[in-house]
Image: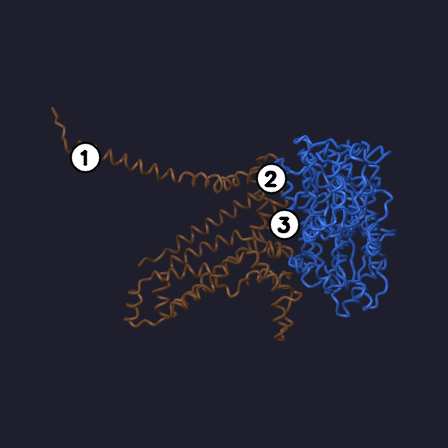
């Protein structure tokens, strides 16, 4: 859905580009000393509307314009997205396969390029990340301009294949007015409170939760939500599976665990995560399992904006749109923690439920087109320019994202800032399995959503759902093995 | 010593000339057809043959395909999603055939029976104009009708005091497929209507007059005279309905994406998802081959069983 929203907002953003072209432009050195000012190239960037998410004067109108001004030899074209978000992966794969992809491309998720490494569709960015950024005096390595956590999340076999100047994550957006009416004065922090609050909302005649369970778009929040719930119940298993510094289960670790049986869907802890979904689903809007709810008129965000549901689960990309609703008093909170009181699968400590982390907003990768068109130098220069912390900040603010530059404030107007603080908290506490499960690919995610739908609406028992999930994990692991070992 | 027959020689010369002239004319004809044949070979038969070839491979759409024999077909036989899609498409085809063969025929006959030609014209227009509405718009409108939050159908049910029956029609696995079937109510397909109207107009007046003179009632005349004489149209629409249904997926793609779960999954959608989302082009091709074979068998059966009645 985030892509759909982007496309809706995108058109107004283009106007704002024209209207506010010069406001707040980042100061760059005089043309003579500008790195790469002599370069000549035609750079095509597919940004998936990341540069124009908001209609406010923002990144596109300042940074891009400034870059164009200081690099007269570089013609910069922002390639518009395909009309149908679900065809997005197909479109990208097609242009990549035929060698006509833009040099810089936004894949659905940062790990998308990993599986295409053997196909030589993407450029390895490790050299670029290790080199200094000439735009930042004193910088020795470009990677130093990214928060350490983000750096780790972006790496695959210690190599960089994508870059993300901003991050975001999914949380539960709630209507403060509805909460007050239901006598809820604090956001729930435990799963038990969460269920209780939804009961209260239901009692006052409000649909507690909008949930786009029909959404199967790769990388969207709903297809990733199981990873958040698994994070609440499966900590002991994750401790066995991973030896990574970040404590996040890596793709090779997950694939190995599926192979060896260390990760089984028949494990009571895995089942417990699905039971949480079932308990939650009792408060979803009617027909949540139908894709119709993902339509333009019935998606959970629209229902939330119209006051038809009290909460919905989505990424922070919704902030610009929600801010346009003058009467909407809203906030956001992370998926609440599980306690022993509610489930025997609960374990002590805070368990992250973020599903995207630093890689989930606008990841970018460089395609092999940069090599074939001999424009790699210009591409590197453009990336170095965008990586300047000030530019990263601008990129993030207007889109409801959080800058990935280390130590930068979340920025934006006060209302947005408060929300983004929560988003950053969620980002900083990702699910330990989310990245690995996402890397299993769009096919896995889509099939998982189907099982979720069938389980939630009673077509499948828990046992049947677990059996289907076991098959899905095994199939995905088989496919993933074909690329997970390569670099 | 034999003497040649000049007449026979002349005749042979003529035959030769005639043959050459025919050949020349044929060559010109083939020349005109040739570009179309080329396009058909490249854009119609080429992909179809390619699908047959790829059905025996593990092609992912991008990497070189590897031959895996009948593995895709073996997997297909035990694939619950594909089997569910077959069951759904049988239901959908059954319903489609029922409404396509009856409702437009009934309406066409009623319109044909109108005394005023002007009224006939306008009535036909009423049912044919919706043909110009793009399928996507049609489907989205029905999606709105079915919406559980403010949708027309639930609103109507509430309005007439049957609110208890209101439900998320597309979000409930028990009703989703039937909701898809119900779309297009009252099912007067403009294309079918035109075909039947043309068929009715083609029946000579003499035939009807003869039946009238023999004292046949209107109902008897319809069932005994007109309906048999419309068997060609019936057969055509039957074939087209079966072919369309077996390959359909637009409605479910837009409205339910095959869900909830796999409640509305159809073979066409399985092919689309496996090929373009899961990048399993080999497996999707195998499904395509199976669907093609089924379509062929059903169509051959229909053409063998239903033979058109001639005047």
Q: Which residue lies furthest to the top in this view?
A: B1
Instruction: Tell me, yes or no, whether the two marked residues, 1 and 2, touch with CB atoms within 8 Å.
Output: no
Rendered-image quadrant of the C terminus of chain A: top right
Chain in blue (letter): A
Q: Distance between the residues labelled 1 and 2?
A: 62 Å
Q: Do labels 1 and 2 share a chain?
A: yes
Q: What residue did someone put label 2 on?
A: B61
Q: Foreground residue, A40 or B7?
A: A40
Image point (82%, 40%), residue name: A146
The 10 Å Cα crowd at callout 2, few under 14, some 14 to 19, many 20 or more, is: some
The one of A381 and A371 positioned closer to us in this rendering: A381
Q: In this view, does A26 lie above or below B253?
A: above
A462 horizontally vs B70: left or right:
right
Q: How far apart are marks 1 and 3 (CA)?
A: 69 Å
Name the foreground residue: A81 vs B154: A81
Label 1: few (<14), some (14–19) or many (≥20) C-alpha neighbours in 10 Å? few
Q: Do labels 1 and 3 share a chain?
A: no
Q: In which quarter of the image is residue B147?
A: bottom right
Q: Where is residue B276 in the image (x, y as percent from the top left)?
A: 61, 45
Name the image colouring.
by chain
Q: Residue B11 carries which label?
A: 1
Residue B108 lies left or right of residue B78; in this view the side is left
Q: Label 3 lies in what chain? A: A
Chain identifier matching the brown colour in the rendered picture: B
Q: Vertically, is A300 above or below B153?
A: above
Q: Which residue is label 3 attached to?
A: A84
Q: In this figure, what is the number of numbered marks?
A: 3
Residue A359: where, in percent of width, then height?
77, 44
Label 1 is found on which chain of the structure?
B
Residue A215 at x, y = what percent?
Answer: 68, 54
Does label 1 or label 2 sit earlier along the sequence?
A: 1
Which residue occupies the foreground of this view, A5 or B37?
A5
């Amino acid at each position: 859905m985030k892509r759909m929203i982007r496309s809706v907002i995108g058109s107004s953003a283009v106007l704002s580009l024209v209207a506010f072209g010069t406001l707040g432009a980042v100061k760059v050195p005089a043309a003579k000393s500008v790195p790469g000012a002599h370069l000549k190239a035609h750079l095509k960037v597919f940004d998936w509307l990341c540069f124009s998410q908001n209609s406010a004067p923002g990144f596109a109108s300042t940074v891009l314009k400034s870059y164009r001004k200081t690099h007269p030899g570089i013609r910069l074209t922002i390639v518009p997205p395909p009309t149908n978000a679900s065809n997005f992966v197909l479109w990208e794969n097609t242009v990549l396969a035929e060698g006509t992809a833009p040099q810089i491309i936004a894949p659905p998720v940062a790990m998308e390029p990993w599986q295409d490494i053997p196909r030589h569709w993407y450029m390895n960015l490790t050299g670029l990340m290790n080199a200094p950024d000439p735009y930042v005096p004193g910088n020795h390595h470009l990677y130093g301009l990214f928060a350490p956590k983000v750096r780790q999340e972006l790496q695959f076999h210690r190599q960089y294949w994508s870059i993300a100047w901003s991050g975001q994550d999914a949380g539960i957006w709630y209507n403060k007015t509805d909460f007050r009416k239901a006598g809820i004065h604090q956001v729930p922090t435990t799963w038990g409170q969460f269920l209780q609050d939804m009961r209260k909302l239901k009692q006052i005649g409000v649909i507690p939760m909008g949930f786009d369970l029909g959404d199967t778009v790769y990388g969207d929040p709903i297809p990733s939500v199981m990873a958040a719930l698994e994070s609440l119940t499966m900590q002991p298993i994750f401790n066995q599976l991973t030896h990574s510094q970040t404590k996040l289960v890596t793709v090779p670790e997950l694939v190995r665990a599926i192979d060896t049986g260390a990760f089984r869907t028949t494990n009571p802890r895995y089942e417990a995560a699905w039971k949480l979904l079932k308990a939650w689903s009792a408060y979803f809007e009617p027909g949540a399992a139908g894709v119709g709810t993902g339509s333009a008129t019935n998606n959970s965000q629209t229902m939330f904006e119209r006051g038809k549901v009290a909460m919905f689960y989505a990424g922070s990309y919704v902030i610009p749109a929600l801010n346009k609703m003058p009467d909407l008093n809203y906030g956001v909170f992370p998926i609440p923690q599980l306690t022993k009181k509610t489930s025997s699968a609960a374990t002590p400590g805070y368990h992250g439920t973020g599903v995207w982390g630093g890689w989930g907003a606008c990841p970018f990768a460089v395609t092999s087109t940069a090599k074939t068109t001999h424009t790699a130098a210009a591409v590197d220069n453009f990336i170095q320019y965008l990586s300047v912390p000030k530019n990263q900040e601008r990129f993030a603010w207007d889109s409801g994202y959080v800058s990935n530059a280390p130590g930068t404030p979340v920025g934006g107007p006060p209302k947005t800032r408060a929300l983004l603080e929560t988003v950053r908290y969620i980002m900083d506490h990702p699910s330990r399995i989310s990245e690995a499960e996402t890397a299993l690919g769009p096919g896995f995610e889509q099939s998982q959503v189907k099982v979720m739908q069938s389980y939630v609406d009673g077509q499948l028992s828990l046992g049947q759902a677990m059996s289907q999930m076991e098959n899905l994990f095994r199939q995905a692991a088989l496919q993933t093995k074909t690329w997970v070992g390569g670099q | 010593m034999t003497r040649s027959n000049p007449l026979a020689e002349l005749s042979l010369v003529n035959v030769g000339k005639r043959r050459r002239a025919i050949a020349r004319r044929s060559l010109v004809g083939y020349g005109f057809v040739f570009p179309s044949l080329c396009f058909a070979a490249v854009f119609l038969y080429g992909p179809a043959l390619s699908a047959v070839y790829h059905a025996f491979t593990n092609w992912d759409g991008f990497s070189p395909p590897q031959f895996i024999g009948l593995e895709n077909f073996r997997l297909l036989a035990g694939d619950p999603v594909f089997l569910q899609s077959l069951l759904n498409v049988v239901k959908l085809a059954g319903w489609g055939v029922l409404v396509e063969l009856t409702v437009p025929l009934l309406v066409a006959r009623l319109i044909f029976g109108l005394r005023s030609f002007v009224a006939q014209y306008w009535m036909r227009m009423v049912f044919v104009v919706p043909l110009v509405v793009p399928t996507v718009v049609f489907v989205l409108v029905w999606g709105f009708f079915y919406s559980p939050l403010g949708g027309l159908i639930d609103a109507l049910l509430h309005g007439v005091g049957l609110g208890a029956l209101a439900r998320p029609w597309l979000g409930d696995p028990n009703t989703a497929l039937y909701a898809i079937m119900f779309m297009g109510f009252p099912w007067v397909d403009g294309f079918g209507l035109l075909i039947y109207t043309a068929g009715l107009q083609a029946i000579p007046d003499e035939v009807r007059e003869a039946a009238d003179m023999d004292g046949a009632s209107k109902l008897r005349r319809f069932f005994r005279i007109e309906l048999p004489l419309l068997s060609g149209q019936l057969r055509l629409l039957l074939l087209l309905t079966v072919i369309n249904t077996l390959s359909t997926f637009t409605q479910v793609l837009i409205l339910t994406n095959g869900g909830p779960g796999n409640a509305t999954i159809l073979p066409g959608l399985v092919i689309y998802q496996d090929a373009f989302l899961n990048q399993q082009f080999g497996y999707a091709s195998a499904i395509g081959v199976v669907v093609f074979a089924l379509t062929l068998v059903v169509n051959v059966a229909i053409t063998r069983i239903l033979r058109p009645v001639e005047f």
